[in-house]
């Protein structure tokens, strides 16, 4: 089949993030980040500053008066959204590629990724658990490993994966592991680590299909949020593709996040209503 070390090397070979983005991610991953430090990093990136102010002044953000400073924009959008915006500006082009192996047309992976991050952002009123800022970034990047794995999913490999699914009842990421010894979420974590992103974001990517395997309570919460947001995105008209069915909302999600089935349906509706406006932020 495919050499595991080749897959890992490819994961490490993706174009690096701008230094300002990794610096911002590192700062916001801590609980004691300071506004002057964050705004200083953002101001060094003129394009990001423009997108940040544009997002803060959009109708979607609920701004009642014009926001003209980076500090006010951060306060308006929140730390998690600011980090997702910074990351999105760096990865948008590669995420818009088509991935035929996953059944994704051009732009579909990007749409799913933004919808997942948006679901994390909108989840707060529906959940009884707090939303870590890193969850926004992990939601946006949760499928970055598909960019790596899709290069190697030839028709022959896909045929074996489908056979494993049919014969053994595996879902997609399990079939990837069975056939290739690694799945897209694990490769995505390698990408995040190689980009110098905080460990918490890499954990959120690595275990979003298997939250109970995350190494801490905080990590399990983060991964449950990303896993639920993945399901919301698919239900809201932005499926992530793959040989397995769309992620489903499960009783386990409900129990761990304190969200009801009615709340999940409301979250799906909220994401569907706001997705097009959020996608416009990144144009």
Image (cartoon, rainbow, N blue to C red):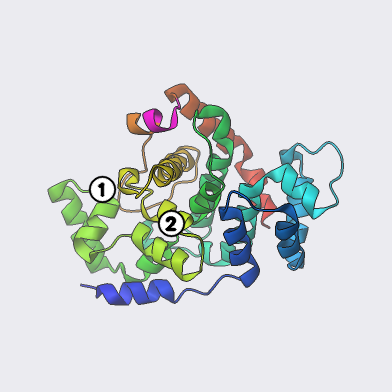
- Across and down, in percent, residue 121 comes to 58, 41
- The part of the chain drawn in magenta is 254-259
| Disc 2 target residue | 143
Q: Is residue 229 above or below residue 188?
A: above
SS category of the residue bearing label 2: loop
Q: Is residue 168 left or right of residue 264?
A: left
**How many residues crowd mark 2 within 10 Å: few (<14), some (14–19), many (20+)?**
many
Q: Quadrant of the C terminus?
A: bottom right
Q: Is residue 44 left or right of residue 227?
A: right
Taking the spot 41% from the left edge, 54% from the top edge, the residue there is: 203
Q: What secondary structure predominates along the stretch shown in magenta?
A: helix
Q: Which image quarter: residue 176?
A: bottom left
Taking the spot 78% from the left edge, 51% from the top edge, the residue there is: 71
- Across and down, in percent, residue 137 comes to 54, 53
Q: Is residue 93 left or right of residue 73?
A: left
**How many residues crowd mark 1 within 10 Å: few (<14), some (14–19), many (20+)?**
some
SS category of the residue bearing label 1: loop
- Across and down, in percent, residue 192 comes to 46, 64
Q: Is residue 156 left or right of residue 246?
A: left
Q: Is residue 261 above or below residue 113?
A: above
Is residue 73 inside the magenta stretch?
A: no
Taking the spot 43% from the left edge, 56% from the top edge, the residue there is: 143
- Across and down, in percent, residue 41 comes to 71, 64
| Disc 1 target residue | 171
């Amino acid at each position: 089949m495919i050499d595991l070390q080749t897959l890992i090397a490819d994961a490490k070979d993706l174009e690096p993030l701008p230094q300002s983005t990794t610096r911002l991610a590192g700062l916001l991953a801590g609980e004691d980040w300071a506004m002057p430090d964050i705004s200083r990093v953002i101001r060094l990136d003129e394009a990001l500053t423009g997108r940040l102010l544009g997002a803060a002044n959009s109708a979607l953000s609920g701004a009642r008066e014009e926001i003209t400073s980076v500090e006010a924009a951060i306060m308006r959008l929140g730390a998690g959204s600011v980090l997702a915006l910074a990351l999105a500006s760096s990865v948008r082009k590669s995420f818009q590629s088509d991935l035929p192996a996953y059944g994704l047309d051009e732009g579909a992976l990007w749409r799913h990724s933004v919808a997942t991050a948006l679901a994390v952002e909108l989840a707060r009123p529906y959940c009884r658990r707090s939303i870590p800022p890193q969850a926004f970034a992990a939601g946006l990047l949760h499928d970055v490993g598909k960019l790596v794995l899709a290069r190697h999913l030839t028709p022959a490999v896909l045929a074996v994966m489908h056979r494993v699914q049919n014969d053994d009842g595996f879902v997609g990421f399990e079939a990837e592991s069975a056939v290739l010894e690694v799945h897209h979420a694990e490769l995505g974590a390698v990408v995040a680590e190689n980009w110098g992103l905080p460990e918490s974001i890499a954990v959120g990517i690595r275990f979003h299909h298997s939250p109970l395997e995350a190494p801490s309570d905080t990590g399990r919460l983060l991964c449950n949020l990303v896993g639920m947001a993945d399901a919301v995105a698919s239900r809201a008209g932005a499926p992530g593709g793959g040989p397995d069915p769309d992620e489903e909302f499960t009783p386990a999600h409900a129990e761990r996040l304190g969200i009801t089935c009615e709340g999940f349906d409301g979250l799906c509706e909220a994401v569907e209503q706001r997705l097009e406006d959020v996608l416009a932020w990144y144009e």
